[in-house]
Image (cartoon, helix red, strand yellow):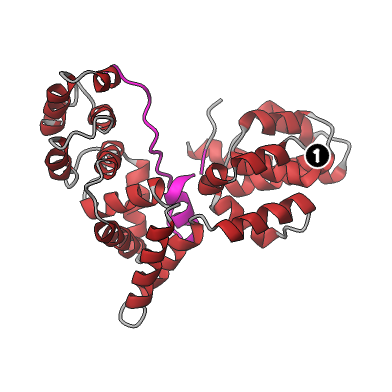
């Protein structure tokens, strides 16, 4: 059964500023990718990127991913020319990532792009437009700079220098554009912070993490599962609430199913609550078994999640 996943940078932005949707940036394997190991493949890849109207034959997403492995300067103007085009969302994000991988995007340009994204999500209309873009891959009208901003925070959001530069831009804008500054602060809130994240992991491990901190961790899990992988993996193999929290933050379907099929009632109740927060789906039969549990608290938690799961199924 497919899992409904609420991740990545835009999930966090949605949680912080009230938007919706999810931006999945991982491209599947493609027949074009082997070309990235062969010099003669560059002209063919450039042709694909220069002729988006032919993407019924070669998808731009795969060509952008492949060309980024070359670091060929010929790709830079082609990628820049393609980024503003109203092609499909996943293709534009791939183009943005390839452009960032080229090394041609300056720090100032990255900050401007993140600021453009913040301005987009600072209004209800802007948030709705991004949400609709997630629901419909063909939604038009999102500026290229906004797409680049999504690429920046999803691929380079752990950069200390970038974080400090965005924070400084927020301070500069605070007096004259409070809404955009607030949006920048919301974006900063979901990016990695070594000291804060280490304290959070320790609180989860020791059972000191309160509900607000756990909700915040769920919003930031796209980064936490990358920057704190080892610590979370160790916790997920343990018992009780810390195990459930870690499994949910990692998005480990295998470990989540192990917990729900096991005998650790505390972990099961905790995980069911977190699944409601994260928007992740697990198989119906697993949940229904817990609805019939003789443990009243576990049965209630399972019933609450089951009701939400039914609404999700109805909306798909």
Evaluate whether residue 167 shows in this view. yes
Evaluate whether residue 307 shows in this view. no
At a point 56% along the width and 56% down the height, the residue shown is: 194
> Which residues fall within the magenta stretch?
5-31
Name, please, the residue furthest toward the bottom: 175
Name, please, the residue furthest toward the right: 294
Element type where label 1 sits in the image: loop
Q: Quadrant of the N terminus?
A: top right
User: x, y percentage for residue 293?
Assistant: 84, 35
At a point 15% along the width and 27% down the height, the residue shown is: 48
Q: Is residue 315 left or right of residue 29?
A: right
The vertical placement of 211 against 291, above or below, is below
User: x, y percentage for residue 172?
Assistant: 33, 77
User: x, y percentage for residue 310?
Assistant: 60, 38
Find residue 24 and report its image quarter. Answer: top left
Q: Tell which of 259 and 306 is nearer to you.
A: 259
Q: Is residue 133 left or right of residue 205?
A: left
Find residue 126 and report its image quarter. Answer: bottom left
Q: Is residue 17 magenta?
A: yes
**Residue tagged 1:** 239
Q: Is residue 99 magenta?
A: no
- The crowd level at tag 1 (other Cα within 10 Å; few <14, some 14-19, many 20+) is some
At a point 59% along the width and 38% down the height, the residue shown is: 251
Find residue 211 and report its image quarter. Answer: bottom right
At a point 37% along the width and 42% down the height, the residue shown is: 135
Q: Is residue 303 left or right of residue 117?
A: right
User: x, y percentage for residue 22?
Assistant: 43, 45
Q: Tell which of 202 and 151 is nearer to you.
A: 202
Specify the principal SS of the magenta part. Answer: loop
Count of labels shown?
1
């Amino acid at each position: 059964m497919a899992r409904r996943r609420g991740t990545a940078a835009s999930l966090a932005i949605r949680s912080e500023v009230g938007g919706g949707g999810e931006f999945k940036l991982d491209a599947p394997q493609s027949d074009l990718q082997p070309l990235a190991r062969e010099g003669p493949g560059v002209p063919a890849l450039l042709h694909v990127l220069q002729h988006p109207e032919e993407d019924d034959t070669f998808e731009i997403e795969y060509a952008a991913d492949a060309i980024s492995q070359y670091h060929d300067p010929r790709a830079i103007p082609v990628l820049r020319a393609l980024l503003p085009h109203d092609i499909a969302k996943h293709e534009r994000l791939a183009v943005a990532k390839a452009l960032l991988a080229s090394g041609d995007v300056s720090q100032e340009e990255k900050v401007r792009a993140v600021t453009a994204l913040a301005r987009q999500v600072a209004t209800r209309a802007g948030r709705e437009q991004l949400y609709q873009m997630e629901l419909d891959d063909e939604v038009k009208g999102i500026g290229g700079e906004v797409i680049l901003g999504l690429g920046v925070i999803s691929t380079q959001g752990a950069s200390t220098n970038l974080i400090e530069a965005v924070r400084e831009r927020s301070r500069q804008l605070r007096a004259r554009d409070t809404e955009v500054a607030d949006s920048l602060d919301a974006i900063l809130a979901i990016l990695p912070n070594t000291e804060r994240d280490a304290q959070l992991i320790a609180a989860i491990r020791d059972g000191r993490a309160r509900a607000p901190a756990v909700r915040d961790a769920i919003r930031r899990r796209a980064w936490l599962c990358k920057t704190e992988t080892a610590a979370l993996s160790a916790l997920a193999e343990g018992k009780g609430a810390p195990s459930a929290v870690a499994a949910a933050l990692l998005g480990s379907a295998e470990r989540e199913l192990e917990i729900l099929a096991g005998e650790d009632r505390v972990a099961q109740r905790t995980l069911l609550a977190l699944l409601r927060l994260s928007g992740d789906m697990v198989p119906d039969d697993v949940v229904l078994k817990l609805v019939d549990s003789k443990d009243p608290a576990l049965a209630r938690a399972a019933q609450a999640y089951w009701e939400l799961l039914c609404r999700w199924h109805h909306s798909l």
